[in-house]
Amino acid sequence: MRSSTALPVAAVAAVAAAVHGAVALRYGWHPDEFYYVVSGQHLAWGYFDHPPLVPLLARMAALGGLPGLRLLAIAAHVGCIVLAALLAAEFGGRRVAQVITAGAVAASPLFMGAGMFFGTTLVDQLVWIAVLLLVTRALRVGTVLAWLPAGAVAGIGLEAKQTVALLLVGIGVGLAMFRRDALRTAGPWLAAVLAAALAAPNLIWNATHGWPSLQFAQAMSVRMGGPWGSLTQLPVLLLLYAGPLLVLLWVIGVRWLVSPAGREYRWVLVVPVVVLILCVVTGGRGYYAGPVLAALFAAGAVYVETEGPDWAPQAWAAALVASFVGAAVFCLPVLPAATGAAQTLRQVNPIPLETYGWPQLVDQVAAAASSLPADVPIFTSNYGEASALTILGPAAGINRPVVSGDSSFAAWGPPPGSADTVLCVGRFPIAKMTQYWEHVEYVTSIRFPDGVRNGESNAKIYLCTQPWGSWDAMWPRMRHSSGVAY
């Protein structure tokens, strides 16, 4: 990237980083961030719902507290912006195309929303764009060694999220259809071997633990409503997640890829088609396919630069600014949590408010537990509650076992001792709890300041006694995924 182009791309990235940084600590932790940090404290080559890389990174970043996690998230989002601009350059785009591409990734709700907190989705986006960039570069360079970086990044990415496999299948099909010449060389195959070798530790872990990742994928598919549920999400992905003002950009990106000017890169067009089909067939979430939008943005930006009218760059600059402002309000904790506008936005995008109120929840649980013996454990309905109490609990005076039957917490097992007296926290139906304890006493409900409501607003605290069995006897029935069983 030439300096004349690097400066405006850097400016776009700097604006995005500044906006993220300005509101990064406005509410607080996301439950997934708590969960990844706790997972990182149980080092393993895999977990029920994710590979090991993100928990390891989260554990290290959390040494700096929440600011450390959010700095890592901002860095990853900036990485997506810069890599997408470089992908536009590989497509032959010059300054205008690269800046438009960078602006589109910065302003797209899909990418901005993922950059709000550190997690697997954000790292997945970074890996997908990097792999697309490196494969495009390898095809241009034409040497065997040029393929190895793509294989290395793909393999590392598979240790962050298995959905990278969808991208690799899409790339393979695209190359088979439009770049069979590349498949006749050793480069792609060596890259595939390298990716498989780097992904092997997590695959071996899965095989020796009964393939929990497949169990998680099946649970997600059931929750999504199977293939039909995934199919209904596609319009949301292509329109809302991409950004309403950016739909035209990916549409003209498709147009450019099917035109003679984009013939060399036509294999890229196959990737989103294959990935979307795989997402639907497997019942996956629509946003799994989202990172491929960066490639379509890049292709559309090249079209704007090379074939668009003279006024197109100015028009797209205005559209990108408007989209960026709208996405910031929609995706980030910009609005005060207690306002009606924030509560209204929660109906469409609940994620920002999911980061609100965790210290208050922990304090209320600490107050309820303060009169109980130190060996009385806390049992929660989901991993977010359990992780928040694990991370924030000691500072609030909670120094007792905290467990859950949710996701990886289930694999870490029940607490020591008996289940004679347990403080239960979360969204438990009474009928569910009475399957495990004969006496269930309501203690209090979780309340947030100023009447703010989010996913934990229905959480309650119960004191449960007289169990129907030991922890070992009840634990297999308490296991579930992401709290949905309750």
Image: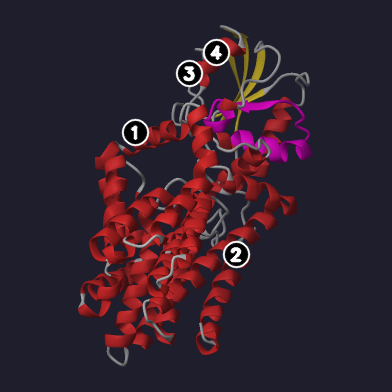
Marks 1 and 2 sit apart, C-alpha to C-alpha, by 34 Å
Q: Which is more toward the observer, 145 or 332?
A: 145
Q: Is residue 51 visible?
A: yes
Say what secondary structure mark 3 lies in. Answer: helix
From the image, tell me which residue sits under label 1.
222
Query: What colour scheme does the image use?
Result: secondary structure
Q: Which is more toward the observer, 129 or 76?
A: 129
- Tags 1 and 2 touching, CB below 8 Å: no
Marks 2 and 3 sit apart, C-alpha to C-alpha, by 43 Å
- Residues in magenta? 385-410
- Tags 4 and 2 touching, CB below 8 Å: no
Residue 34 at x, y percent in the picture: 62, 43
Q: Is residue 387 magenta?
A: yes
Instruction: Identify the residue shown where x is 30% and y is 61%.
Output: 175
Marks 3 and 1 sit apart, C-alpha to C-alpha, by 21 Å
Marks 4 and 2 sit apart, C-alpha to C-alpha, by 43 Å
Say what secondary structure mark 2 lies in. Answer: helix
| Label 3: how many Cα within 10 Å (few below 14, some 14–19, many 20+) | few
- The residue type indicated by label 4 comes to Met
Number of the label disc, if any, that sits on residue 75: 2
Q: Which is more toward the observer, 183 or 463?
A: 183
- The residue type indicated by label 1 comes to Val
Number of the label disc, if any, that sits on residue 341: none
From the image, tell me which residue sits under label 4.
474
Residue 205 at x, y percent in the picture: 54, 34
Name, please, the residue furthest toward the left: 259
Q: Is residue 121 visible?
A: no
Q: Which is more toward the observer, 155 or 366?
A: 155
Q: Looking at the image, tell me whether mark 4 or mark 1 is earlier in sequence order.
A: 1
